[in-house]
Amino acid sequence: MDHYMKTSRKTDSLIECGKFCSSIDDCRRFMFDKETNFCSVFESGENCITDEKIANKVCYRQESTCNEVNCTRCPIGYYGDQCQHIIQDCSDGYTGSVAPVKNLLSYIQPSIHGPILEVKCTFNCGGVTYIQYRKLNCRELDFNRTMDEYANGFGYIHGSYWLGLEHVYNILHNGNQFALEVVYVFNDKLMSPARGYYYDFNISNRSDNYRIDIKSYVEYTAKSIGDSLTQSGYNINGRPFSTYDQDFSNYDCPGRFHGGWWYLDDQVCSRANINGQRYGTTFESSWHWLDNLGNRTLFYDTQLKLRQK
């Protein structure tokens, strides 16, 4: 899922690499290494990605494959006979069957007059949009950001990122009901990920400080994270989103937890810190999710996802 590479092989030239991409139905971009003649083709995404040196590499993006009647190969997220339409979120892509049933990078446009975004999608199980993604083997991304940054989004689509509260708000207000899925993946690959679902998840607009609205928590039967957000005494329901430059907690919660979140107006702040530091100087500033996951502060990755009900 990291590089979204379809396949690769050695070719004689850049032209042969392009022909190789054209011969594969779901190739939408390719990268050619001029030194090794190695050709890599990709199924989704706007850019080529590699862990190797890029000095000898060139990346080409195929916008669409069209004849006089229609386009047969649109960028992921676009559809229509001339690729003239775009999905609002990943569940929209699933219900409209506009993408293969797998994990892909996709373009979405949550608001008809808003920007076109590139996001991680899962085009099965109803369609899932990743609104937060953090991976241990990616360069650490600082989540201690301003309110403007949390509103508009930040990070790298191939690594760790936060989609943006404004975009999340637009997805949630397009007429469907969503659950917020929280996932923690452990360093031990033998341990299955822990997850849980918050049903009827919603947030208000920026003028109301993106207040969170959650109706119920549903455990994942295989391995549950436990309810750190709405349990009695520590329920963040109705709380505004706080950052270090706009703190509604009255207890310096963003400063202590080193990230933005829907913090309580209480010295406890939150029983979860999914936007904290990878290697925090204190427990409360580090990644954690107290219920069921205890005092763990280091995970392989964490994810926040929107799943349509």
Image: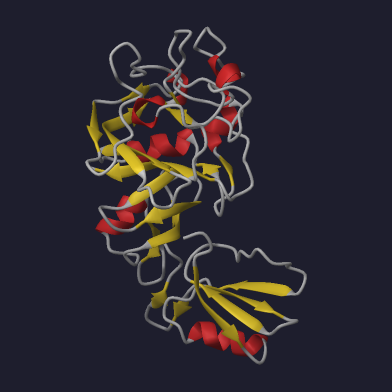
Front position in the image: 21 or 54: 54
- The answer to whether residue 77 of the structure is visible from this angle is no
Q: Residue at x 48, y 24 (%)?
A: 261
Q: Residue at x 45, y 8 (%)?
A: 266
State the quadrant of the C terminus: top left
Above/below status of 54 relative to 212: below
| Residue 202 found in image quarter | top left
- The answer to whether residue 294 of the structure is visible from this angle is yes
Percent coordinates x, y for residue 176 in the rendering: 25, 41
Percent coordinates x, y for residue 95 in the rendering: 25, 57
In this rendering, the count of numbered labels is 0
| Residue 51 found in image quarter | bottom right
Above/below status of 283 relative to 300: above
Which residue is most to the bottom? Answer: 12
Percent coordinates x, y for residue 242 in the rendering: 51, 20
| Residue 154 found in image quarter | top right
Above/below status of 105 relative to 287: below
Q: Describe residue 215's horizontal placement relative to residue 73 as left or right.
A: left
What colouring method underlies this structural image?
secondary structure
Percent coordinates x, y for residue 170 in the rendering: 39, 38
Above/below status of 246 relative to 118: above
